[in-house]
Amino acid sequence: MATPQSKYVAFISYSHADEAWGRWLHKALEGYRVPARLVGQESPVGPIPSKLFPVFRDRDELATAHELGSEIEKALAASASLIVICSPRAATSRWVNEEVRRYKALGRVDRVFCLIVDGEPGDAGRECFPDAVRFQVDADGTIIDRPAEPIAADVRAGKDTRARRQTQADCRRAGHRLQRPQATRAGSTQPPASPRWPRWPSACRR
């Protein structure tokens, strides 16, 4: 949720090649209704709102630019969280890496969340995490040779089992129920036709 100091609930960072995922996630988040029992409760970034709105989505890959535009920099600084759509395209995108680096340099490492849509973490040929996600960033904004521990949701077909089990356990401890996200079709790198994810916390049922 947006805080008194932030204009946006989240900033979505993605490669232009993954624009379909960017549009899908943007629509899913802004259309999501927070369960009434959670609205108004305090969180690390302020009271929980009834909707996750607004969300900033960068629509350009900035292929011909030499640095991030002022609008992007302002939006990063004004966002309560950063969501990175991770894929081999994002891993090699200069601008996705730069957006993550800049955001971490603001001291918001714990507000960076990843959505894996393609590729494989740690696979040299199909790495999905940009360097700024894989490694820590110091106070000067320099990526240093210390592994980070990305917080990631995984919507690749058949890949969310362990994460979903952990999330289910967390939900039960919190007294909530989490509904299964809609995964992609096997072998597909495209988002679902309708934005049904994320739908937590409503049902931890199988």
Image (spheres, helix red, strand yellow):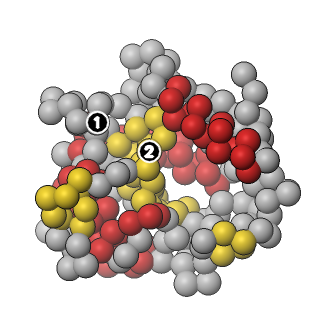
Q: Amino acid at mark 2?
A: Ala
Q: Is residue 69 visible?
A: no
Q: Identify the residue at horizontal 14%, vertical 58% (top origin).
A: 145
* Above/below status of 45 relative to 31: below
Q: In screen coordinates, is 48 left or right of 152?
A: right
- The numbered dot on residue 43 is none
The quarter of the picture where the N terminus appears is: bottom right
Q: Amino acid at mark 1?
A: Pro
Do residues under tags 2 and 1 come within 8 Å of each other at their CB atoms? yes
Around disc 1, counting alpha carbons within 10 Å, would you say few (fewer than 14), some (14 to 19), or many (20 or more)?
some
Lateral position of residue 56 relative to residue 148, left or right: right
Give the CA distance from mark 2 to mark 1.
11 Å
Residue at disc 1, secondary structure: loop
> Where, quadrant-wise, is the C terminus in this rendering?
top right
Estimate the x, y position of residue 110 in percent, counting from the top left. 44, 64
Residue 18 is situated, as x and y percent measured from the top left of the image, at 36, 40
Q: Nearer the viewer, residue 52 or 16?
A: 52
The label number, if any, that marks residue 152 in the structure image: 2
Q: Is residue 98 left or right of residue 64?
A: right
